Amino acid sequence: MSGDSGAKPPFANAPGPLPLGDAKEQARISKMIQKVNQANTPPPGLSPEQLEEFYEAAKDDSDVLKPFPNNTNPTTGEVNGPRGPEPTRFGDWERKGRVSDF
């Protein structure tokens, strides 16, 4: 890019993900992705206060890592243990998407 104002970034012509074999399934997934992106993307031109309101309204109350009442797991009775789903449920230790085998 030697001063050419119309130059494209080096990744502009990079290939995208490979399409699925079934065109109907590909269209369904593309629509689903667009719907999620539109729902989670604030409209342009919002003030910081409006952005904060947008993201506050989008918060989900089903946070699996929210603290247990009195810091005690109601299912197991464990005190001060890990929050959320049981980390050993698949035979290894999983925490926030990272897995360690014993």
Image (cartoon, grey):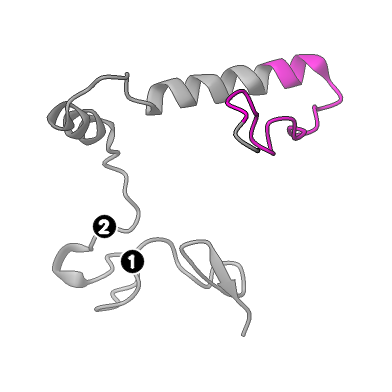
- Residue drawn at point x = 48 percent, y = 26 percent: 36
Mark drawn on residue 83: 1
Mark drawn on residue 66: 2
Q: Regarding mark 1 in the picture, which secondary structure is present there? A: loop
Task: Quadrant for residue 21, please give it.
Answer: top right
- Percent across and percent down for residue 58 are 28, 32
Q: Earlier in the sequence, mark 1 or mark 2?
A: 2
**Magenta stretch: includes residue 8:** yes
Q: Which residues are magenta?
A: 4-27
Q: Residue furthest front?
A: 3
- Residue drawn at point x = 81 percent, y = 16 percent: 23
* Distance in Å between CA atoms under marks 1 and 2: 7 Å
- Percent across and percent down for residue 70 are 14, 69
Mark drawn on residue 3: none
Residue type at mark 2 is Lys
Task: Quadrant for residue 49, please give it.
Answer: top left
Q: Quadrant of the C terminus?
A: bottom right
- Percent across and percent down for residue 72 are 22, 71
Please say if the residues under marks 1 and 2 sit with CB atoms less than 8 Å apart: yes
**Magenta stretch: includes residue 18:** yes
Q: Is residue 62 shown above or below 98?
A: above
